[in-house]
Amino acid sequence: MNPRLIGSIIGKDVRQGLRSSMFIFVLVSPFIYTFFIGLIFGGFLGEGRPPTLGVVDLGDSDLVPMMKDFEGLVTRVYTTESRMLNAIENNVIDGGVVLASDFDETLLGGKSPDLSIRYSGKSYASNRLNIQNSLTKLVRDMAGQEVPISINTTVLGNEKALAMKDRVTPFIFLAVIMVSGFFLTSLGIVEEREEKTISAVSVSPVTITEFIASKAILGYIMAIAATMLTFLMNGVTDPAYLMLLMPFLFLGGLFAVSVGVIFGTLIDNSTELMGMAKGINFLLFAPALVILFPSIPQWIAKFAPTYYIIYPIMEISMLGVGWSKVWDEFIILIGIVVVTVVIALYLVNKKKNDLYTT
Amino acid sequence: MSLIITVMIIVAMPLFFNLMPSDVEETLYIGIHAPGLEGVFSQMNTTDEALQLTIYNDTNALKVDVEEGDVTAGIILPGDFVKTLLTGGKPRVDLYFPSIVPGEAREPIQALLEELSFVITGQNLPVSLNTEIIGEDYAGRQLPFRDQTKPLWISMVLLVEIMSLAYLIIEEKQTGAIYALLVTPITTSEIFAAKIIVGTMLAMVETLLIILLLGSFGANQIAILLNVFLGAVLATGFAFMVATPARDLKSSFSWLMIFYIVLLLPPLTIMYPQAASWVVKVLPSYYLADTFNQILNQGVGLGGVWQNLVILAIFDIVILIMGMLILRRKFQ
Amino acid sequence: MTASIVADNITFCYGDLTAVDHANFEVAQGEVLGFLGPNGAGKTTTVKILTGQLKPKEGSAKVLGHDMAIEPKKAAAKIGVCFEEKNLYPRMTARGNLEFFGKLFGNNVDAEALLRRVDLAGKGEARVENFSKGMKQRLMIARSILNEPDVLFLDEPTDGLDPVSSENIRKIIHEEQERGASILLTTHDMIEADKLSDRVAFMNEGKIVALDTPENLKLKYGKRSLKVRPKGRVEGEEVEIPLDDPETPEKIRDILKEGEFDTIHTSEATLEEIFIKITGRGL
């Protein structure tokens, strides 16, 4: 393979690409995905939201800051009771209380102020129980009642709790790798077939392998660069983790461009490519969806090849696991990539005439 | 091959949907080792879905179950727990959590344990507590999470048609076929109408198929059909708006992706109302997804969703008019 | 001397359809071979085989001594192809297109000189998507000669061009021939083929049905005549005297005796008439 020829094609694609909104989209996709999905929904996606309690404080009670500081409760302050009731009815919050203007005075004076917790009918029973116990604890603390037991808390096991925001991140990584690696590569090939410029290149000294390689190399470089940027934007900056992530990233990029080459070889018009990409996206992103919703049996995700890219990336970047936890997924990923690359090379060779005369 | 992929999605989506759990876990499972107090704690199991206390005679077995996440927490009371309490002492209680339970979820359980101890020592609550349920009480019969996702899946299928339909229009422009049409007696309005009809029908068929396969085409069929129709018109109108000025597929792709992501936000907020702000109500897809949610998950009929349908219809008309104006401006 | 292009019994099929049926011909160095035939005759398929885009089912296609089915890239640097379809990069400038392909051929291209040569001077910075059909065609010609090829394949080179531009392109073809390039010229334009080609090959339904110089083809298949319109007669009332008839001199003397004439000219068969005669169908 002639690097000069490959470099010439890549250079042409970059110069043309910088005028293309698709290319620009790939460059900014880390920002788009991180912002829209990670920032806006990172705190909310997934099941099992923490108990959320609304409060209308008519007397500037000391209970409200205590509620806000309590870790097991998400507290939202409402200015009016009607607004809070509206939020309860729509299940925006699990429940709500109204603190009378003399609540603190009554409580600290040894009398029993009324405390009515209004629950949303759609709130989970466990959340109601947690709200009640949390509120009673806070009230007792405020009233100066000493807890009659001492509690010694121990955490068992090594598996870390994964915050909901962290579960969204694999989706972002996968989206960036696939948009950059798969789309750029496949579209780059298909466009040249549509415009018939591949025929013009075919009668030059460039071989079909060099031509395809130039598309794949550009897609690969973009995939790696965009994903690295995504890592940094999502707080994955520890050099030790980044070193561990690199092999998965490199293989993931290779998988994405190989799939891009396969599609670019099989499809000769961009409309059909986009139509197929719509469908393939659903299948490829399925493992990210499964990870997002832990109540779905996680074994389902293992059938998708992209699972072996994003799950180790998530484990390393979000849970801080080491090589010993991910080496098996790495081996499987190598196998997947080898198979995909072989299929891609086979198709390029078999479809050479079709590509030239498309 | 594109058709094969479309069929695969139509098959895969309901399959994926049915793999999601169909029940809701709203119970706190807590294991407790309380020598001599087994009877007391057995009676404490609530009659509603909130709490399930499991008595363990073996502390090691309890710890194993905690570590494996079979229970949310494990409590080990010392053998002289009650005696120490009643004589004014402060017994030490061991509370175990599995590592997968996040920190913020541990505090309420700790509060539960503290409350138990207060009850045992007879310390009254310093407030007069009462509870009330607002709206219909769904405890014990909560809507499974997968059913909550229905409006999202259906909206996704509908909205992704914006891309498919846009590509069809762009392809016609790229091949020049649209110009061949324009030199015949057909007017731009007639071309527009034909495209809208075809686009709407395609989007409707795919969406209705998904709804059928999700098992959701039971009651309120007229309301569902109307909503699907209006959603399909919406998708087609947006497709037109993006595709008409687009030069080619690649240049329109970015805009289509942005449109798609933005329009998908409201269906997500239907599932997570705590994430919603007033901004989402500006987007037409909110009314689409909210209507699906009300019909499919709350059993609301046409009478309850007509306002949403009217708003959606108004959006449709505005978008169609804009699409038509853009088409005219481009080709006349 | 070895021919630059040697098509030896090449056959190609698209499924059940035999597109090229045992075609045999050669193009010598510096020769222009015109390739004539109706749409679907197999001309483009033959060119694709000769340029290495397709592999023949039977036979061999050699260009500059290299078998194009086995080692196409060995000849690639010294061939130039002007395709019938306009396969330029639309979002690149004219200069950009030429310089890019120049790099692929390993040449430093003087884009301005090439553009001047095809009457596109000053259009170097314009994007190809904004070019007219004729401008694109001229740029295609420029691209096909940027590497100073030894063998040039031209498929409908004057398609979409006005008479002045067409004449300019013919001039370029002639210059390339003088430079020593062998040229395979595919065209529907018989006048062009007649003017430019040293020899002409007729292709019909995949077969080469005739291959000779235009003159020989006309002599062999065509009829020559003298057409005279005496004064007072209208167009269409010419007297036609065949020139190959033994009684021709006498007939000419007889008509000359009539006195004054409005027009007098010779006519010979066109290549199209010869093609129809040979194949029974038009171009």
Image (spheres, grey):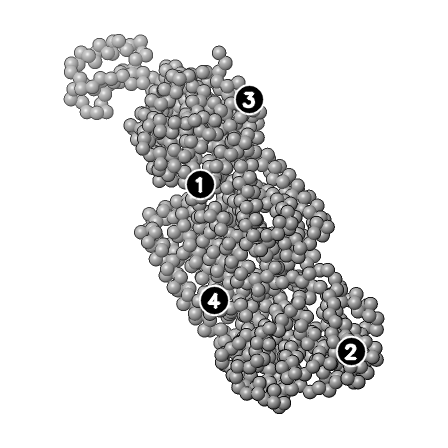
**What whole-number distance in Å separates the C-alpha atoms at marks 3 and 4?**
66 Å
Give the residue at mark 1.
A16
**Residue B91: mark:** 2
Give the residue at mark 3.
C67
Measured as percent of width and height from the top left, residue C187 is found at 39, 27
Q: Nearer the viewer, mark 1 or mark 2?
A: 2
Q: Residue at x 57, y 71 (%)?
A: B297
Measured as percent of width and height from the top left, residue A90 is found at 54, 75
Give the residue at mark 4.
B280
Tags 2 and 4 touching, CB below 8 Å: no
Q: Is circle 1 on the same chain as circle 4?
A: no
Measured as percent of width and height from the top left, residue A20 is found at 44, 45
Chain for disc number 1: A
Helix, strand or loop under label 3:
strand
Helix, strand or loop under label 1:
helix
Q: Badge 3: how crowded within 10 Å, few (<14), some, or many (20+)?
A: some
**What whole-number distance in Å separates the C-alpha atoms at marks 1 and 2?**
75 Å
Q: Is circle 1 on the same chain as circle 2?
A: no
Q: Badge 1: how crowded within 10 Å, few (<14), some, or many (20+)?
A: some
Q: Nearer the viewer, mark 3 or mark 4?
A: 4
Type of amino acid at the residue the image marks with label 3: Asp
